[in-house]
Image: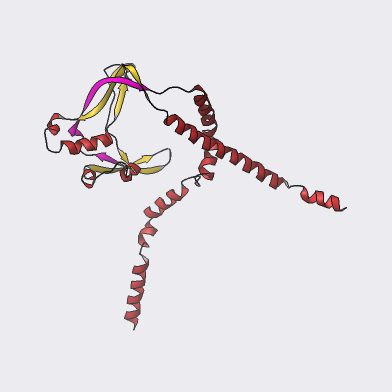
Amino acid sequence: MEKDNLMFFRLRSLRSRKRTIKKDVEKQIRKKYKRSIELWKIKRDIPWIPFEEPYQRGFVRFFAITEEVMRTKDAEFFEGILKKINTFMYSEIRHFLKKKKKFGRRIYVEREQKLKSLSSYEWNNPKIQLTQRERQYFLKRSEYCPFRKMHYDYYDFIEPWRFTLRIRPNMITHYKPVNATLKKEYAEVESYVNQHKITGIIQKKIYGKSNSWNIEYKTDLIKSIKYFHYKMSAIEIAESLEDDCVRKF
């Protein structure tokens, strides 16, 4: 009888078994995600090897300071800004064209290229090191993202006429050796990690946030009329109560 009771208590419930399976799956996902980061770092740290004879592969278009600005005393200052917002575009031919449909037929038009707009993260990133004088040449704008249904802030350079587009041959001087085994393993791990359900579990369990409902709620709260009327600080409320008491007495 005692043995039967002991075996009964050793039996695990369905809920306990499901919890164990769920934990095992999460451990496997964490392991795969950690391995993907390790493989990415290994690929990144592979040293570049120079070619004995560099070769040309198409053309590259970029921004450069105009000759008028180059002759001024602020040439070095605007060159520093350009390093932070410059963009590069590549093409197989010297003409940077794209196909466009017009009046039922396809024509070639020039590809548009603009200076880089700094995001809020880049604006406050200490690695970019924007000085106070450089910040004066940027204008803040808000742009709505239809996918995330949120507004994001960007900073645009207000004097783009100081830069002009230049084209030069795109010379290939270095290469990275290919490790077939590493590339295969990285592709397998990335294929597993980038699945829709796996991405959601990683976002929730590793980074601790599943969605941006809190941000949207705060945004709506700030924009609401009630919050505007009742955003008095605690100090102001205390001072107003003290004034009421003084008036009564």
Task: Pick the residue in front: 55 or 207.
Answer: 55
Quick check: 227 left or right of 21?
Answer: left
Figure quadrant of the C terminus: bottom left
Task: Pick the residue in front: 91 or 142.
Answer: 91
- Displayed quadrant of residue 82: top left
Task: Pick the residue in front: 88 or 73.
Answer: 73
Number of dots carrying numbers:
0
Instruction: Please give the name of the residue rendered at 59% of the width and 41% of the height, measured from the top-left corner.
Output: 27
Q: Position of residue 87 (x, y in %)?
A: 29, 30
- Say if 154 sits above or below 247 in the image: above
Task: Pick the residue in front: 142 or 174.
Answer: 174
- Say if 219 sits above or below 188 in the image: below
Which residue appears farthest toward the right when viewing the image? Answer: 1
Q: Position of residue 93 (x, y in %)?
A: 29, 16
Q: Position of residue 204 (x, y in %)?
A: 52, 44
- Say if 8 sits above or below 190 in the image: below
- Say if 29 sits above or below 237 in the image: above
In reply to whether residue 164 is colored magenta, the answer given is yes
Instruction: Please give the name of the residue rendered at 55% of the width and 32% of the height, measured from the top-left corner.
Output: 192
Whether residue 69 is visible: yes
Q: Which residues are magenta?
A: 155-176
In reply to whether residue 149 is colored magenta, the answer given is no
| Color encoding of the figure | secondary structure
Whether residue 96 is visible: no
Q: Main secondary structure of the magenta part?
A: strand
Instruction: Please give the name of the residue rendered at 52% of the width and 44% of the height, measured from the top-left corner.
Output: 206
Q: Position of residue 146 (x, y in %)?
A: 40, 38
